């Protein structure tokens, strides 16, 4: 049955190889079960409910990938997109998280339509290659910046931002924190970054997840030793999992089906949807092509067979994830770890999906992991995204300068969508003014996007 459905021998693999690959993929991306609730809770969402939504969205999306495309790729709420959801759309623009979920839902519907037609290719081809790489790099810096803030390694100060100091932290926040609550967590976070870095360099399977767990365990040791003293008033809680309720699954009710269409009739909302769609589309296609090329799945023309099914799985998972109550669900680049273990079919994805289902019963563990332990994961994932900078052609200033503006705008303006806006506007304006439009073959869609973004700044 497995042979017939997944075509194992045709793809040069077997059940054992696929199962091991699926376990490996889960290990490398299970950190999202701790990180996503932490990020979305900043938008006011219930952390336990987000954990459940994250696990369910990952399970559904990964199963759909196996069914629609028979590929060994796993899906989960995407890093960068969750940060954009919480820190830009909700905290920055002032939308409620319900309206932000609506934007994700609409994006998913649009993505389904685009995945069933050839419009997706037109949009993908309209954006210059260098600018696509720049978006990924900018998101990487943005995520790393959030990680540094969550760990209190970077705080506000006389120079706008500065390295952590206890006196400055108390002055900025108007509190009386001590070394035994905030101070020790900063040290633990820095240790966590180093530990995760060592694991990455050593190519340890599941390095990011292991980095989180080791940092958390070090925190528990410090709590037992009296070095870390919980201070709930300042947001520093006990680090031990609460199993008093058993291994029950947190209720999804606080965030389930909370779609709100009341704020959709505005240009800002359109920009939000476009930003979600833009990042998801290019992140997904880039991941699919990158991972599949590593697995030698591309055809002689460099195209990925059954890519329409893979994109459709991504789109349906995003729509379902929004209803469940989480940010955009997308294909994870960590799928490469399972591919490197020999995963070649949807059986790898099914194995990963089953493990996400089992993880639902381990919520007390994932929800007890503190932000200082997940911060190193954000910083290291930011590094992975930053490596796309090598795909930017810096020898052509007309290409490189808009990319630089796009990259710098995301962390400095604290917004992914502002970075995309600035990148598109500067790319069009600089090339038009310098007479390079014919040489660059700028698409009509780029002109339309530039005009829309400029109008946004003029009238909003």
Image (cartoon, rainbow, N blue to C red):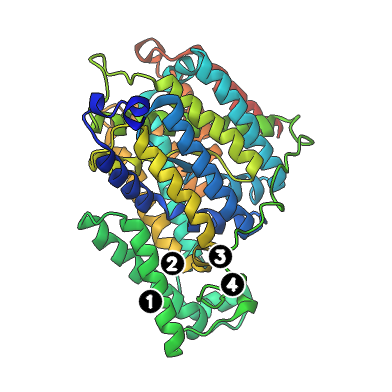
Q: Residue at x 34, y 41 (%)?
A: 335
Of pointers 3 and 4, the one earlier in the residue sequence: 4
Residue 428: % across, % down: 47, 22
Q: Which mark is residue 172?
A: 4
Q: CA distance from mark 2 to mark 4?
A: 23 Å
Between 171 and 80, the residue placed more toward the observer is 80
User: Which label sits in the foreground, 1 or 4?
Assistant: 1
Q: Are marks 3 and 4 in contact (CB under 8 Å)?
A: no
- Mark nearest the camera among 2 and 4 is 2
Q: Mark 1 highlights which residue?
A: 218
Provide the secondary structure element on which disc 2 rests.
helix
Q: CA distance from mark 3 to mark 2?
A: 22 Å
In depth, the one of 254 and 411 nearer the eye is 254
Looking at marks 3 and 2 on the same chain, the residue that comes earlier in the sequence is marked by 3
User: Alpha-carbon distance for marks 1 and 3?
Assistant: 24 Å
Q: For mark 3, give the secondary structure.
A: loop
Q: Position of residue 137 (x, y in %)?
A: 38, 41
Q: Seen from this angle, which residue lies furthest front?
A: 1
Residue under label 3, please give it: 247
Whether label 1 touches label 4, CB < 8 Å: no
- Are circles 3 and 2 on residues that touch, CB within 8 Å? no
Query: Neighbour class for label 2 at 10 Å: few (<14), some, many (≥20)?
Result: many
Asked if the residue at tag 4 contacts the one at tag 2, i.e. Cβ–Cβ closer than 8 Å, the answer is: no
Residue at position x 52%, y 53% in the image: 36
Q: Quadrant of the N terminus?
A: top left
Which residue in the rendered view is the most extreme toward the top? 438
User: Which numbered tag is attached to residue 250?
Assistant: none
The circle drawn on residue 373 is: 2
């Amino acid at each position: 049955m497995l042979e017939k459905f997944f075509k194992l021998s045709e793809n040069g693999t077997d059940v054992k190889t696929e199962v091991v690959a699926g376990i490996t993929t889960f290990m490398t991306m299970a950190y999202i079960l701790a990180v996503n609730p932490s990020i979305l809770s900043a938008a006011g969402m219930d952390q336990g409910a987000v954990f459940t939504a994250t696990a369910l969205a990952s399970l559904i999306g990964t199963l759909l990938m196996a069914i629609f495309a028979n590929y060994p790729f796993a899906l989960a709420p995407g890093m960068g997109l969750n940060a954009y959801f919480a820190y830009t759309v909700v905290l920055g623009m002032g939308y409620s998280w319900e309206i932000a979920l609506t934007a994700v839902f609409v994006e998913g519907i649009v993505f389904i339509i685009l995945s069933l037609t050839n419009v997706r290719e037109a949009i993908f081809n309209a954006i210059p290659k260098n600018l696509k790489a720049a978006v990924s790099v900018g998101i990487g810096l943005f995520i790393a910046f959030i990680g540094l803030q969550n760990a209190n390694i970077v705080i506000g100060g006389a120079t706008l931002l500065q390295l952590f100091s206890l006196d400055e932290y108390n002055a900025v926040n108007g509190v009386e924190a001590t070394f035994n609550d905030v101070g020790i967590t900063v040290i633990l976070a820095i240790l966590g970054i180093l530990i995760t870095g060592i694991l990455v360099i050593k190519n340890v399977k599941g390095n990011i997840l292991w980095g989180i767990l080791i940092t958390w365990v070090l925190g528990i040791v410090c709590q037992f030793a009296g070095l870390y003293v919980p201070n709930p008033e300042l947001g520093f809680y006990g680090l031990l999992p609460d199993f008093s309720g058993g291994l029950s699954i947190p209720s999804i009710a606080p965030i389930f089906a909370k779609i709100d269409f009341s704020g959709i009739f505005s240009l800002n909302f359109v920009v939000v949807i476009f930003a979600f769609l833009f990042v998801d589309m290019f992140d997904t296609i880039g991941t699919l092509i990158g991972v599949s090329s590593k697995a030698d799945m591309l055809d002689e023309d460099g195209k990925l067979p059954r890519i329409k099914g893979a994109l459709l799985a991504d789109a349906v998972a995003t729509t379902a994830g929004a209803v469940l109550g989480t940010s955009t669900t997308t294909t994870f680049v960590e799928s490469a770890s399972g591919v490197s273990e020999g995963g070649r079919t949807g059986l790898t994805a099914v194995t990963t999906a089953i493990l996400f289902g089992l993880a639902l019963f381990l919520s007390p563990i994932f929800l007890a992991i503190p932000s200082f332990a997940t911060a190193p994961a954000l910083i290291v994932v930011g590094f992975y995204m930053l490596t796309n900078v090598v795909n930017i052609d810096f020898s052509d200033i007309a290409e490189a300068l808009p990319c630089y503006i796009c990259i710098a705008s995301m962390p400095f303006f604290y917004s992914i969508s502002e970075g995309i806006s600035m990148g598109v506007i500067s790319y069009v304006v600089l090339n038009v003014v310098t007479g390079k439009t014919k040489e660059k073959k700028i698409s009509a869609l780029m002109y339309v996007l530039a005009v829309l973004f400029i109008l946004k700044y003029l009238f909003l």
